[in-house]
């Protein structure tokens, strides 16, 4: 498999990105080519630092960088030779099977639309993987679409179910629509209409799910629009960091607690590893003619390597073929379900 990496978009620079690439190459012999997209001088210097001499590495020159401050659409129009745009082009032109970027999320979503949507898919969606009590769950959309129609949410449910089945290994993933209560009368007109659509599909659909279902093994696939999903994502990231800091401060509060903390060190390390966002690598942009992974802007080496691992998993499972097949079947059923016009 061939993977293109935008090595210029992250907060920590090209050298950190290449350190992650080196880890990924060492871990996966199935990767036949790794395309490093960015400024040649920066890549050459970083390769020297990390002694990255792997013959599978190919450099794709790009003279510009899209920053987090660039407006997405304006940025991809004006900076046509940016590393993000050139990396996406590798997939568009059949030179790579997947693309990974730590750069501007809006620009990555907008630029990836040039890949075209899978047949039958109305909107792409960002799928994020979260830890729950005993297993992981998938939530989508986490930011690609601020607004969504009922049919979009129904398609997100289908793609999320396929992802959970193929990547998480769940035979019958439980799918729920995020709402403010479990009763059918709750939610918005959009979620109520989506509820009726999802009930007609070949899903293990459980109806509405609430916030306390998310991290208690209550659901495997959580469906929402990108506005809500992005708020949940960033809130969870912030809360995780806050709990870690509070716990650290409390353990250091007095010698007795420090002794207890030392005795419980193994448990703390296991918990940190379980909740470490670097293990998850990045979020998948589903529904396009190509594999697209958005890694966090602050990703360091392990997170970059994990993002490459996620991309490789999607390629191995041939996810887009499964998406296309099941979206086609779902659309036939959805076409027969009348949906009231939204106010």
Image (tube, rainbow, N blue to C red):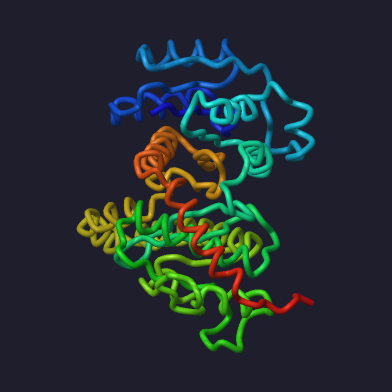
Q: Position of residue 213 (x, y in %)?
A: 44, 75
- Counting the numbered discs, the total is 0
In the image shown, does 338 or 77 lie closer to the viewer? 338
Is 295 situated above or below 214? Answer: above
Q: Position of residue 23 (x, y in %)?
A: 34, 28
Q: Is residue 47 left or right of residue 24?
A: right
Q: Position of residue 74 (x, y in %)?
A: 79, 36
Residue at 40%, 39% (x, y): give it: 315
Q: Is residue 222 left or right of residue 268?
A: right
Residue at 57%, 33% (x, y): give it: 10
Q: Is residue 193 left or right of residue 307?
A: right
Is 86 situated above or below 136? Answer: above
Is 153 situated above or below 277? Answer: below
**Quadrant showing the C terminus:** bottom right
Q: Quadrant of residue 234?
A: bottom right
Residue at 42%, 57% (x, y): give it: 162
Q: Quadrant of residue 341?
A: bottom right
Residue at 63%, 18% (x, y): give it: 62
Residue 10 showing in the rendered view? yes
Is 228 situated above or below 197? Answer: above
């Amino acid at each position: 498999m061939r993977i293109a990496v935008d090595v210029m978009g992250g907060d920590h620079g090209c050298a950190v990105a290449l350190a992650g690439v080196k880890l990924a190459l060492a871990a996966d012999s199935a990767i036949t080519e790794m395309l490093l997209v960015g400024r040649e001088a920066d890549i050459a210097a970083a390769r020297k630092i990390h002694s990255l001499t792997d013959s599978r590495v190919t450099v794709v020159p790009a003279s510009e960088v899209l920053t987090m401050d660039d407006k997405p659409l304006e940025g991809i129009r004006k900076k046509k030779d940016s590393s993000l745009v050139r990396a996406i082009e590798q997939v568009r032109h059949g030179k790579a099977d997947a693309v990974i970027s730590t750069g501007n999320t809006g620009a990555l979503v907008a630029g990836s639309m040039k890949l075209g949507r899978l047949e039958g898919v109305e909107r792409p969606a960002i799928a994020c993987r979260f830890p729950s009590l005993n297993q992981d769950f998938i939530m989508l959309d986490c930011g690609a679409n601020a607004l969504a129609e009922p049919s979009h949410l129904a398609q997100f449910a289908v793609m999320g179910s396929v992802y959970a089945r193929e990547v998480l290994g769940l035979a019958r993933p439980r799918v729920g629509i995020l709402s403010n209560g479990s009763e059918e009368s709750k939610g918005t007109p959009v979620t109520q209409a989506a509820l009726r659509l999802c009930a007609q599909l070949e899903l293990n659909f459980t109806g509405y799910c609430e916030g306390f279902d998310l991290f208690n093994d209550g659901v495997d696939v959580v469906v929402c629009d990108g506005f809500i999903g992005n708020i949940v994502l960033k809130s969870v990231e912030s809360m995780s960091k806050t709990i870690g800091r509070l716990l650290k401060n409390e353990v250091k509060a007095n010698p007795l607690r420090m002794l207890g903390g030392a005795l419980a060190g193994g448990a703390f390390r296991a918990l940190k590893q379980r909740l470490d966002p670097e293990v998850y690598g990045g979020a998948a942009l589903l529904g396009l003619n190509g594999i697209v992974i958005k890694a966090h802007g602050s990703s360091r080496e392990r997170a970059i390597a994990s993002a490459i691992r996620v991309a490789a998993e999607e390629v191995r499972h041939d996810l887009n073929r499964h998406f296309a097949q099941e979206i086609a079947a779902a659309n036939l059923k959805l076409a027969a379900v009348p949906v009231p016009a939204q106010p």
